[in-house]
Structure formats: structure tokens, C-alpha cells
């Protein structure tokens, strides 16, 4: 293997397409494979970055996260599987694997690591772009699910806080739930605040009052 194949290199290739390109990070210690894949993706309208090692890939990602990383599994030093684990922990970059190994166990391990797809060498050139497009679509679905899950979690948390604040008002004002909710809502509207923000403030104030009550009780005990 030549020194060009083992050196840590990163070369940006910009698509000729006038529209914004999706960027793919290609990671392989074989410079011939890197150049071939870069050429194929370039003409398919993608922008690419190349890295000849996992370490070079991490450096590239720290500067600009790609839309997808295509990782060779077997590389000297840090393997593609190890790099994938780093990407999962440290970034939000989706990844797929490139391997010349047909071993079922290795493919299963790659899939379980969170890969959105994989290509097996020797690959048909006509299969590369469709496989990457499918991986990108899968990555987009995962991102959307994560956003939806985050929004749902926030909504549920806000709902719990509002419900607790309504219960607190019911107890303090000796009123029914509907009236307590209307009071909370009207206060939020008149002060141009979100309902859950008012609920948070109310719960925080009650917690402070409880703390002061405890402190007062402690002072009286010491007398």
C-alpha cells in the first residue's frame, strides 16, 4: 500500500449542482476506493469529504458534520465500528458501512451499532447511489422521530406542570378545577406568558414558601 493510501487525508469535492448538496463523508484507508466513490457521488450531485483514517474522519466531523458518513469497517488503528460508536456518542451524524467481509456476525454487529445501511465490496457501481439515498432517507426518518419524541416529551412535561399548578390553586383558593384553570390561563394571557411558564413560576413559588415554613419551624424549635 502506498503512502498516499495510509496518510490521513481530507479532500473536499464540491458538486456541480446549483442546488445545495447533501454532504457525504467517505472514510477508507484505500485511496483508490475513496477516489472512486468521490467520483461517483460527485456526478450524482453530492458533495463529499474524504478521510483516510478514523482519526481524520473525527477531525473532519468536528469542523463540519456531514449528512451521512460511509465508513469502511476494516481499517488500521481505529476500526469503522469503533468510529461509529464515537459518532453515536459525540455527534448526530448517521452512518453506513462499507466492507469486503461477508461474515454474517460482522454484518449483524454493524447493523446493531445503529447503521442506516451497508455496502459489501466488490460492489456494483449502479447500486452505490441508490443505497446511499435509501440510507439518507432512513436517517431523515430517524431525525424526525427524535424531534417528534422530544416535542412530545416537552409537551407531556408542560402538561404535568400545568396540572400540578391547577391543583395547587384549587387547594389555595378553595375552588373547582375549571375555575382554577381559567384563572391560570387568564393570568398567562394578561401577562403575555405561556401557560406552562406561569405554572412553573407558581410551583417554584410554592416550593420556596415550603422551604421558608421549614426554616421557621426550625427557628422556633431552637428557642
Image (cartoon, grey):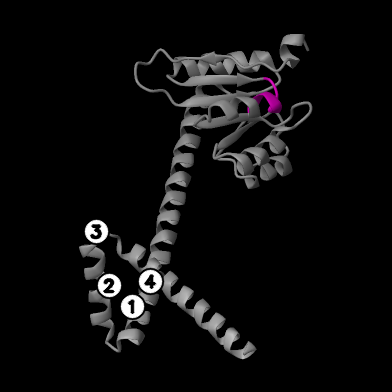
Separation (CA) of disc 3 from disc 2: 12 Å
Please identify the quadrant where the C terminus is shown.
bottom right
Whole-percent x, y for residue 78 in the image: 75, 31
Residue sitting nearer the eye, 203 or 130? 203
Kindly report which numbered mark, 3 or 1, lies closer to the viewer in this rendering. 3
Whether residue 55 appears in magenta in the rendering, the answer is yes
Residue sitting nearer the eye, 151 or 206? 206
220 w.r.t. 4: above or below: below
Q: What SS does tag 3 mark? A: loop
Callout 4 crowding tier (Cα within 10 Å): few <14, some 14–19, many ≥20: many
13 w.r.t. 114: above or below: above
Residue bearing mark 4: 202
Q: Is residue 41 left or right of residue 90?
A: left
Q: What SS does tag 1 mark? A: helix
Separation (CA) of disc 4 from disc 2: 10 Å
Disc nearer the start of the sequence (2/1): 1
Disc nearer the start of the sequence (4/1): 1
Residue bearing mark 3: 192
Separation (CA) of disc 4 from disc 1: 10 Å
Disc nearer the start of the sequence (3/4): 3
Residue bearing mark 1: 166
Separation (CA) of disc 3 from disc 4: 16 Å
Magenta-tinted stretch = 52-57
Check contact, mark 3 vs mark 4: CB within 8 A.
no
Disc nearer the start of the sequence (3/2): 2
Disc nearer the start of the sequence (4/2): 2
Q: What SS does tag 2 mark? A: helix
Amino acid at each position: 500500500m502506498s503512502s498516499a493510501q495510509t496518510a490521513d487525508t481530507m479532500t473536499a469535492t464540491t458538486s456541480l449542482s446549483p442546488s445545495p448538496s447533501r454532504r457525504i463523508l467517505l472514510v477508507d484507508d484505500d485511496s483508490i476506493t475513496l477516489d472512486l466513490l468521490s467520483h461517483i457521488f460527485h456526478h450524482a450531485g453530492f458533495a463529499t469529504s474524504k478521510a483516510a483514517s478514523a482519526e481524520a474522519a473525527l477531525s473532519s466531523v468536528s469542523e463540519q458534520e456531514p449528512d451521512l458518513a460511509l465508513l469502511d469497517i476494516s481499517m488500521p488503528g481505529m476500526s469503522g465500528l469503533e468510529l461509529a460508536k464515537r459518532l453515536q456518542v459525540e455527534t448526530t451524524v448517521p452512518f453506513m458501512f462499507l466492507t469486503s467481509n461477508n461474515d454474517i456476525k460482522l454484518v449483524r454487529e454493524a447493523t446493531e451499532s445503529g447503521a442506516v445501511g451497508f455496502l459489501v465490496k466488490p460492489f456494483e457501481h449502479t447500486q452505490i447511489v441508490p443505497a446511499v439515498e435509501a440510507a439518507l432517507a432512513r436517517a431523515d426518518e430517524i431525525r424526525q422521530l427524535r424531534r417528534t419524541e422530544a416535542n412530545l416529551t416537552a409537551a407531556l412535561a408542560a402538561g404535568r406542570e400545568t396540572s400540578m399548578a391547577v391543583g395547587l390553586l384549587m387547594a389555595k383558593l378553595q375552588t373547582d378545577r375549571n375555575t382554577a384553570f381559567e384563572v391560570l390561563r387568564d393570568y398567562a394571557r394578561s401577562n403575555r406568558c405561556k401557560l406552562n411558564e406561569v405554572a412553573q413560576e407558581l410551583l417554584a413559588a410554592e416550593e420556596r414558601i415550603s422551604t421558608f415554613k421549614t426554616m421557621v419551624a426550625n427557628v422556633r424549635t431552637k428557642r
